[in-house]
Image (tube, rainbow, N blue to C red):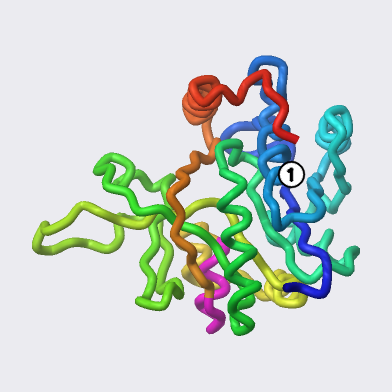
Amino acid sequence: MFKGETVCVIPARLESTRFPKKLLQIIEGKPLLQFVYENAKKAKKIERVIVACDHEAIKECVESFGGEAMLTSRNHTNGTERIAEVAERLSCEVVVNLQGDEPLMHADVVDQVVAVLQKDATCDMSTACISKSDPEEFLNPNVVKLTKDKNGWALYFSRAPIPHDRDGRTNRYFKHLGIYGYRRQFLIQFSTLAPSVLEQREKLEQLRALENGYRIKVVETVHDSIGVDTEADFKLVKEKLISLGRVGASHA
């Protein structure tokens, strides 16, 4: 067990590039961000949930449904820098980075990325994946794929369809999910590293860790999730939440 607190920090930027103000979009009377917050609160290994926001509008939204939010600099270039700013203010031991646009992320996945840090003292950073076989999704650059070694350490993350199956024997792949676990000190150190070459080409922050020689432990889950990057994603997620009976119920 950890000696310090385990905190889930949700980075939340108001003016996202592809879908501005998406976190404040309403689904049957509830903002998108609230679904994410409530999922994090359900995780058994999380002791505190904080939304790291860049705008008073998001802070007010979070506080309106009883959540905790901290204003952070508007100059951060990514979510990792934003949650690292919050981590510097805390005395916690582990920080989970749960993307603010992942309202379908299951609480069990949050617990899984924490559990691997508890189990393996050599692990400073963890994430999650799910095995899939959707040909259309496999080719979609908005869906990140990954490869890992036999011990669960990440080999690479890409928007490209990896791994390529030259002989056409299988159509299975690992879809990366938008969640990370960090030991606090590693997170703060990681956030100060300069953007790496592959990170900038793929637009994937986690490649900065791999390019600098750090390892990322990947846990496999059975719970899929969909990130909201576009209005089309939002409509799909809304339908999913309604079909799952999540709308209108309290999950705090």
Is 187 in the magenta?
no
Decide if residue 131 is on the left or right side of residue 251: left
Residue beneath the point at 64% across and 64% down? 114
**Considering depth in this image, is 48 or 229 the residue closer to the camera?**
48
Neighbour tally class for label 1: few under 14, some 14-19, many 20 plus, Cα within 10 Å:
many
Residue to which mark 1 is pinned: 41
Decide if residue 207 is on the left or right side of residue 75: left
Where's residue 12, x and y in %? Answer: 73, 44
Q: Residue furthest top?
A: 28
The image quadrant that residue 156 belongs to is bottom left
Q: Quadrant of the C terminus?
A: top right
Residue beneath the point at 57% across and 62% down? 205
Is 209 in the magenta?
yes
Where's residue 129, x and y in %? Answer: 45, 57
Q: How many marks?
A: 1
Where's residue 107, x and y in %? Answer: 62, 46
Residue 78 visible in the displayed image = no
Q: Is residue 6 above or below residue 63?
A: below
Q: Quadrant of the N terminus?
A: bottom right
Residue 33 visible in the displayed image = yes
Where's residue 148, x and y in %? Answer: 38, 71
**Considering depth in this image, is 133 or 19 the residue closer to the camera?**
133
Q: Is residue 96 above or below residue 63?
A: below
Residue beneath the point at 72% across and 48% down? 10
Q: Residue furthest left?
A: 167
**Numbered disc 1: secondary structure:** helix
Looking at the picture, which amino acid does disc 1 mark? Lys
The image quadrant that residue 101 belongs to is top right
The residue segment tinted magenta is 205-215
The image quadrant that residue 224 belongs to is top left
Residue beneath the point at 65% across and 73% down? 118
